[in-house]
Amino acid sequence: MARGERRRRAVQAEGVRTAERAARGGSGRRDGRGGAPRSTAGGVAVAVVVLSLALGLSGRWVLAWHRARRAVTLHSAPPALPANSSSPAVAPGLFWGTYRPHVYFGMKTRSPKVMKRDDPEERQGTTPGTPKLRHTCEQGDGLGPYGWEFHDGLSFGRQHIQDGALWLTTEFVKRPGGQHGGDWSWRVTVEPQASSTSALPLVSLFFYVVTDGKEVLLPEVEAKGQLKFISGHTSELGDFRFTLMPPTSPGDTAPKYGSYNVFWTSNPGLPLLTEMVKNSLNSWFQHRPPGASPERYLGLPGSLKWEDRGPSAQGQGQFLIQQVTLKVPFSVEFVFESGSAQAGGNQALPRLAGSLLTQTLESHAEAFRERFEKTFHLKEKGLSPGEQALGQAALSGLLGGIGYFYGQGLVLPDMGVEESEQKVDPALFPPVPLFTAVPSRSFFPRGFLWDEGFHQLVVQRWDPYLTREALGHWLGLLNADGWIGREQILGDEARARVPPEFLVQRAVHANPPTLLLPVAHMLEGGDPDDLAFLRKAFPRLHAWFSWLHQSQAGPVPLSYRWRGRDPALPTLLNPKTLPSGLDDYPRASHPSVAERHLDLRCWVALGARVLMRLAEYLGEAEVAAELGPLAASLEAAESLDELHWAQELGVFADFGNHTKAVQLKPRPPQGLVRVVGRPQPRLQYVDALGYVSLFPLLLRLLDPNSSRLGPLLDILADSRHLWSPFGLRSLAASSSFYGQRNSEHDPPYWRGAVWLNVNYLALGALHHYGQLKGPHQAQAAKLHSELRANVVGNVWRQYQSTGFLWEQYSDRDGRGMGCRPFHGWTSLVLLAMAEDY
């Protein structure tokens, strides 16, 4: 996706010009008769009027400038994490990691400075053409299943990639020591899928190192272009050495013949690396193993003479790549050794390669299996070995999708007016780091706020330290008002993958505060380290919640409205509400300030409850006294009924200016156009039975004796509405919006498909009410058991069939849909299997 250049103006300068034009317009005003200025007394009166007008405009400009400045100013509360928390001195075990989740295999430091090591793969052909280079994870690559079989989030991982007839296994392990993050080693094994060894292809692997500044890289080459090693030095890594070991056959120690090419140049920028390599593969070389016929392959015609690398900008960084071409099957190992780790003891550490690497990888794999069962108890619960493997892959894919990002986002300030009246351009947010899991390595390889709360529910069970790091980084994004952008597009690589219209985050747009879900779990768990973290994080959590509660307030007390709905364009069946996270879920047909959004009110109620309990625990009496009445009011049955119970529909619902008489009809040459019939829109409850209708149940806001709980359970269990053999539908099959496109180019998204995050909330709620005495206890427990079997069973069947976890699942046949692999909130299937809510 090409990056779009956005025009930027200085908000302050434009505001000054506006004020100056207004002042000039007033100063030349004559009286109504068109004659000369009035007498002295009248002249004074006119001057006072003009001065008042100018002061009024100036005051509004100052307010606008103040709003714009606060939008891109970091919050003043103390950080939740220690200073330099990502550095090797503070967190050496997390300094290196697979923190570029959008590449098939690579390592990166948790540092704003670039030091990355990656391994693209190319399948060689025998005729000229565009090389088939695998580097960044892409939906259109046509790869079979790929993903992490094991990944512990810290020091070890094993990944499998199916590429046509090839089966690749990538493994890494880290060894702590020294002051710079320790040592680590890779192994990449390429084998044929079938047992036959005939017509085995040539494959090139590309091992590269890229830096972004004054870092020193000193390669030493052996005969035939093979790098002996790369030594170097940076301020953060100290002295280090990379070594590419001689390739072998899998499981063997005897060297295997390989052909080598090397390329050394300036860093062109991370988004351009793939194209640079493709464009440089313009020469044919001969692969000549002893006693075998030569084969041609495309290679890099590079030089290791730094003066031959071409022009570069000062401080641009270096890009050094080693191509090794071999006949399948083979294994290649790559070793990183830290100078301070090697110097840390009396004896030099043995190189982590060969049999030692094999032993270390196997010991980590066994430790992973044991820790996994101890944490999630799937074997104990009677799940099959295949289902246990699914659970391990779900966790590992989520942990292997954790990335470290650094950069500046684009923010459109909240100017205190409706978005259609905004006249300012976006501004750059300060440079910030973000340590976060991502929803999908191939399609959404960046941070999403409401996704991350669900991600951390899984991560926290495995490693609470990782969750504290992630939450601390997200809270570090808070602006002066308490806002956090819902999508974090930090750095050139992230921007290169996002359409220009989605680059700007609007400082009036909220997102569901799902980070409070792991916060609530931390508070309930009582772990001392978690509680110490929550004490530091509390001022920022409170500021974030306060912004949400105040900025999204609705038209009447205790009502809330998502800011940022799409306008009622003639091409949209129902204007989307992206900030809600539910995108095209049907809302009022005609957006207005009179809307009351049920899901948002429930999220605010959850936030008030969690923050009140946290404030009470921490002894923050003033905040607890502030939030206590709010939480009680938002959870009061009378208030919820008054604003959101639709008696005529028999469910909770949104409220707004709405009519069901809307549809898309073809109208050449425009295409599909929205047509509004009769009855015309009026203020009423929105008939859109689905996930939104369930939110008082999903977030456990209802009393177990509530008269509303039974009807919700009945509707949930009705196959004419939400129940399917594969999980709960996002929109009832009985809805007029079910399965409907939102525009000619916008297929249905949250209009019937089964989503794991909301099904997990439903399972947790059913389990909750199934444990509490009340008239609906037995029904809730029965539905929990049946829904869990449906959800887990379908995800397992689709994983068996495709090898992927999917973004969503069809409510009609259960097939995986959307992007894949999707190890974000679909990894919640693991907690569903473990019955951990």
Image (cartoon, rainbow, N blue to C red):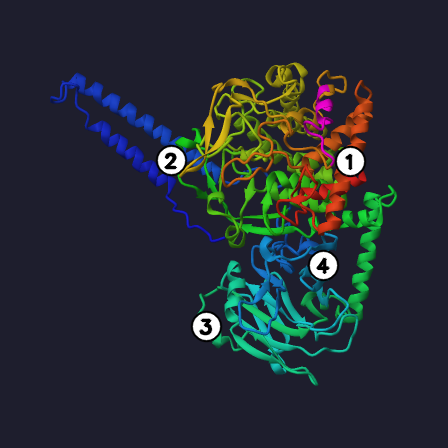
Q: How far apart in space, not on screen, are marks 2 and 3 (Cα)?
A: 45 Å
The answer to whether 234 is drawn above or below residue 85 in the figure is below
- 498 and 747: which is toward the camera: 747
Amino acid type, residue under disc 3 in the picture: Gly
Q: How far apart in space, not on screen, are marks 1 and 2 (Cα)?
A: 50 Å
Look at the numbered discs 2 and 4 and tell me whether their residues touch, using CB distance below 8 Å. no
Return the residue at label 1: 788
Amino acid type, residue under disc 1 in the picture: Arg
Look at the numbered discs 1 and 4 and tell me whether their residues touch, using CB distance below 8 Å. no
Amino acid type, residue under disc 4 in the picture: His
Q: Tell me: 303 left or right of 523.
A: left
The answer to whether 304 is drawn above or below residue 487 in the figure is below
Residue 183 appearing in the image? no
Q: Tell me: 645 left or right of 829.
A: left
Q: How far apart in space, not on screen, are marks 3 and 1 (Cα)?
A: 60 Å
Residue 437 appearing in the image? yes
Return the residue at label 3: 310
- 717 and 268: which is toward the camera: 717
Sequence order check: which comes first, mark 1 or mark 2?
Answer: 2
Q: How far apart in space, not on screen, are marks 2 and 4 (Cα)?
A: 50 Å
Q: Which residues are magenta?
A: 711-725
Sequence order check: which comes first, mark 3 or mark 4?
Answer: 4
Residue 731 point in image, percent of width and height: 63, 30
Amino acid type, residue under disc 2 in the picture: Lys
| Residue 156, quarter of picture | bottom right
Question: Within 10 Å of the Cα at label 3, are there few (<14), some (14-19), or many (20+) other Cα atoms?
Answer: few
Return the residue at label 4: 160
Return the residue at label 2: 423
